[in-house]
Amino acid sequence: MTATPTRTLTQRLDRLPFTRTHLRVLTGSGAGWALDAMDVGLISFVIAALVNEWQLTTAETSWIASAGFAGMAIGATVGGLLADRIGRRSVFALTLLVYGVATGASALAGGLVALIALRFLVGLGLGAELPVASTYVSEFAPARMRGRIIVVLEAFWAVGWTASALIGYLVIPSVPEGWRWALAIGAIPAVYALVVRWALPESPRWLSSRGRVTDADRVVTGLESSPAVFGRVAPSVAEAPDPGVAPATTVAARLRGLWAPAVRVRTAALWVVWFCVNFSYYGAFIWIPTLLVSQGFGLVRSFEFTLIITLAQVPGYAVAAWLIEVWGRRATLSVFLAGSAVAAILFGQATSVPAILATGMALSFFNLGAWGALYAVTPETYPTSLRATGAGWAAGVGRIASILAPPAVPALQAMGGIPAVFIVLSAFFAVAAAATWGLAESRGRSLAE
């Protein structure tokens, strides 16, 4: 599979089948994604355990969660800017190292203040990693299968969250101070970061945008010579529309570019969706184990229910991965968010065990399918010089909501009980579903350069 002089780098990338190198990029990034999810999921189980062990108030436990999300908000915005400046792969590896070390240190925290401070550092690394990883993988993926590949990347989140549920269920209740052992396991990404840094290639689109054409050509040539896993060479791919944004070379230019006339509606819609989805997701899933305990279920039983609910994430991703290249990005995202809104109301009303499990699994199915579609559409919103910055700032705005959600849930519960909590979360899902129609539809199109 050789390049002709008339084919651009973008055309060469988009004609490719899914190769072994694509698989290595996807699984290497996905493993980091799963480890991220494991860390975020673990804190929900740690909080439930610390309520009893440290006799924490609801306000104190909410600050543990919010500290991590505050770090994520800063990490997402700074990480995106750095990835557009120094490269996707380098920032990806650095963020894994930061949050892996900080998570391991959290296992040694002697009190609430130390744990909150370390959770902030964890958030810095985690917040930067997620938008950078989705940008990185999207820049390798051929256009006709890009959405599906990004949803598969997001599906690694379910693997990590399930791992956290298993650790929460099997480790935390089983040994003294089991939450420390759970957090120590979260230090694994620090080792994995070294593998990522040396084993994965840099994004050829980023290399080209920085004038490193020879390096970009070398990466694409490697992709072209890599054996196909599935698919064939495509004869042609629909060109991306002119993004209408001048290439950005400075931080100020990148930030202005997010609000250029051609993309300002997309940016506004994207920020609304990210804000609402984060508020609803973290408002629900960080608190589910603790809310179940408050309903009279024991710690072990609530962890067991959470594990079962978490398993529904996997089919949610699978269905979204199929629909995103059939219905398109906006329709898939909107339908899954609407499903999340309905499931949230039903979960808030559930009182019996079958109803709690059924509605919780529906919430998990629709919500995580929506996340997959959101991560697919976000990098497609901007040209290469703005892509990581745009994804990072959208995620950063979302993290503001995730800071607000943990303390908001106890306040809502005090006013109207669990039903009130999930009515409000449902409303946020509904707003996000409406906002999706301000996004661009990029199914089957090349990424804008």
Image (cartoon, rainbow, N blue to C red):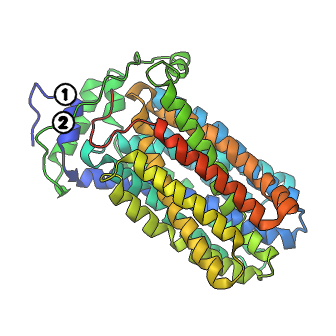
In the picture provided, is 352 more to the left or to the right than 190?
A: right
The answer to which image quadrant residue 448 occupies is top left
Q: CA distance from mark 2 to mark 1?
A: 6 Å
Place of residue 323 in the rendered image (x, y in percent of width and height, measured from the top left): 35, 57
For disc 2, the marked residue is: 12
- The reply to whether residue 267 is in sight is yes
**Residue ID at (21%, 35%):** 238
**Residue ID at (32%, 22%):** 242
Task: Please state which amino acid type lies under the numbered disc 2.
Answer: Arg
Q: Secondary structure at mark 1?
A: loop
Q: Secondary structure at mark 2?
A: helix
Place of residue 65 in the rendered image (x, y in percent of width and height, measured from the top left): 74, 54
Residue in front for this viewpoint, 353 or 93: 353
- Asked if the residue under mark 1 is in contact with the one under mark 2, i.e. CB atoms within 8 Å, the reply is yes
For disc 1, the marked residue is: 8
Q: Number of numbered discs present? A: 2
Task: Please state which amino acid type lies under the numbered disc 1.
Answer: Thr
The answer to which image quadrant residue 210 occupies is top left
Place of residue 345 in the rendered image (x, y in percent of width and height, measured from the top left): 66, 64
Mark 1 nearby-residue class (10 Å; few <14, some 14–19, many ≥20): few
422 relative to 439, above or below: below
